[in-house]
Image (tube, coloured by chain):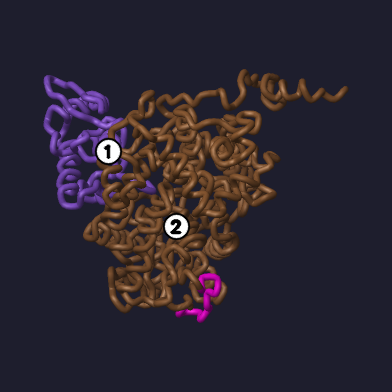
Amino acid sequence: MADTKVGQMSEDVVKAPSMMTGAVPTKDWMDVPAVFKPGNYCYPGKEEMAAYHNKNLPGLFGESRTWLVESDDWLLPENWKEIIIQGIKERLDKFRSFKIFMDCCVRCGACADKCHFFLGTGDPKNMPVLRAELLRSVYRNEFTKAGKILGRLAGAREMTFGVLKEWFMYFYQCTECRRCSVFCPYGIDTAEITMMAREILHLVGVNTNWILEPAANSNRTGNHLGLQPHTFKENAEFLLDDIEEVTGLRLNSLTFNRKGAEILFVIPSADVFADPGIFTFMGYLLLFDHIGLDYTISTYSSEGGNFGLFTNNELMKKLNGKMYAEAKRLGVKWILGGECGHMWRVLHQYMDTMNGPADFLEVPKSPITGTVFENAASTKMVHISEFTADLIKHNKLKLDPSRNNHRKVTFHDSCNPARGMGMLDEPREVIKAVCNNFYEMPENTIREQTFCCGSGTGLNTGEIMDLRMKGGLPRANAVKHVRDKFGVNTLSCVCAIDRATLLALMQYWNPDVEVCGVSELVGNALIMEGEKERETGLRFEPLEGSEG
Amino acid sequence: MPTIEHNGSSFSVDEDGFLTKGMEEWNNEWVDYVKSVEGISELTDEHRKVIDTLQEYYKKNGIAPMVRILSKTTGFPLKRIYELFPSGPGKGACKMAGLPKPTGCV
């Protein structure tokens, strides 16, 4: 077959059927408009939420107003284009990474088929390279010579309302999971491109309520859910009742805001509110009691997660600052963090320079094993899975893994702990020690290549459920594989968004698979001193051999 | 924001049909309206017990109770709550009681 001539090819790529799907594009991507309809967008931020953030961080959240996404008038400020171009300029000057990521992509396409949203929706604008081009095209137009002179020939285009709509659509169909970055030969962190785009959208008041409201709650009450101190404490103590029912033991080691404790423990707040996170929380408490840990939980720094990350740098910094502030106030030595996802991206990659140096804390050292966590020497924060894996390695836990025999477990590497901080082996070591049945999903769907739950970065809201089920399909498909092959019935993970959203994803695609945190499995297996014979797991499910 | 008209009363609701002003605007007409859209044939003392519990808890805590607390306080297992409110404790019962939806990693 003769090779296609270049002129023909350039026409074909726009007009010929896709070799993969046979679908026929009719227009260049720049000419395909974003059309909003119910189910393909998140509800916009409520006026009072935007006003609240504006009061705290003036100028970063645009004008507060009630606006409708499907309307052709978003009630933008008159000079919205200037604000956006100025917003890009400021960030190019401030973040060297942003400038490099705008310049260095050669559009090789290595990332194109790595995105769960592209695989789930088939929409070309969900190819990470094209998603970035949505912003890069405007960058070229305003900030590069070639773009200014050659315009569209150089892949440049003007900022228009249509482009703004496109940004709102596709930068909210990216979960900043960074799977595509793993494959980029230049190491472009496409998550940071989405972060920049969202920052810039917030400047003109283009936002979503599912992000603004939790972030406002977190600023006001300490956590996304808006649990006030007395409620937070009551919820946690309610779970002590459940622990007592399962084990026969009343734990008395849980304290709140206790000055002089050795360790401050920070959790995602959903762990004291929603299934199945509450069972993970029960696991933490059993573990700490088992080893006699001197720890306390703060009702002020009562959230590991940080929806500020999904708005802008300043709010992220403000919300994250609570952890160090509280650690200082309580006089603890170091901080232990729970099974939260994006918390660890913020911690591992930004906290040190953003909120540090935490020179009032000590380099974390396990009081039980003496292990010094050198990897956390600067942030002074250790992940619960690292901490638990170390205890297991030193044989400090009495475990009966057969109590998890009713579970055939696989592990979903939550994106941020895996790709954001490089924690790949520790949760596996923990699971293998506390469960007898552990099966891995295919290797291109785990560890660094893990597939996102499809609902991270504040996309875990109900109105886009169809989109979430599409974005989560690659993950669900890998789970289905181990379910069919090995009879896997439990999907474990180390992230609160995962625990909430994988639950919906499994109910949709694999209804017989349950979701749990790793620490729940630990709590089930721990042999506590003086406990009664356990007949159920922490969620009151019968153990193997005690059914009926 | 959309408005719901029911038996002569008018309610301002959000995109998911929850009362924008919450319990401030809540009344028996609202209960009657949610009953009709939820497909609940008859409102029983059990429904009222769930609503009362939710409202009482919300007044004290500014948030809906976690489901296990709702179960324990009312004495209804989750299965029974779903029988009473087919859309579940959040979308069904909280809506009827005039509580907002919880947000965050849930």
Q: Circle 2 is placed at which residue position?
A: A343
> Sequence order check: which comes first, mark 1 or mark 2?
1
| Same subunit, tags 1 and 2 | yes
Residue B25: give its label.
none
Residue A371 is covered by the magenta coloring: yes
Q: Nearer the viewer, residue A180 or A513?
A: A180
Q: In this orientation, does residue B40 appear?
A: yes
| Secondary structure state at the residue bearing disc 1 | helix
**Picture residue at 51% right of the left edge, 41% below the top:** A174
Residue B105 is covered by the magenta coloring: no
- Say what amino acid the circle numbered 2 marks: Met
Q: Determine whether, in the image, residue A542 is placed left or right of residue A229.
A: right
Q: Determine whether, in the image, residue A503 is placed left or right of residue A24.
A: left
Quarter residue B37 falls in: top left
- Say what amino acid the circle numbered 1 marks: Glu
**Is the magenta region chiefly helix, strand or loop?**
loop
**Picture residue at 37% right of the left edge, 70% below the top:** A264
Q: Which chain is purple?
A: B
Span shown in magenta:
A366-377
Q: Between marks 1 and 2, how big is the CA–CA gap?
A: 27 Å
Letter of the chain that mark 2 sits on in the rendering: A
Residue A47: give its label.
1
Q: Nearer the viewer, residue B51 or A359?
A: A359
Indicate the colour of chain A. brown
Q: Position of residue A403 (x, y in %)?
A: 48, 60
Q: Is A328 drawn above or below residue A234 in the view shown?
A: below
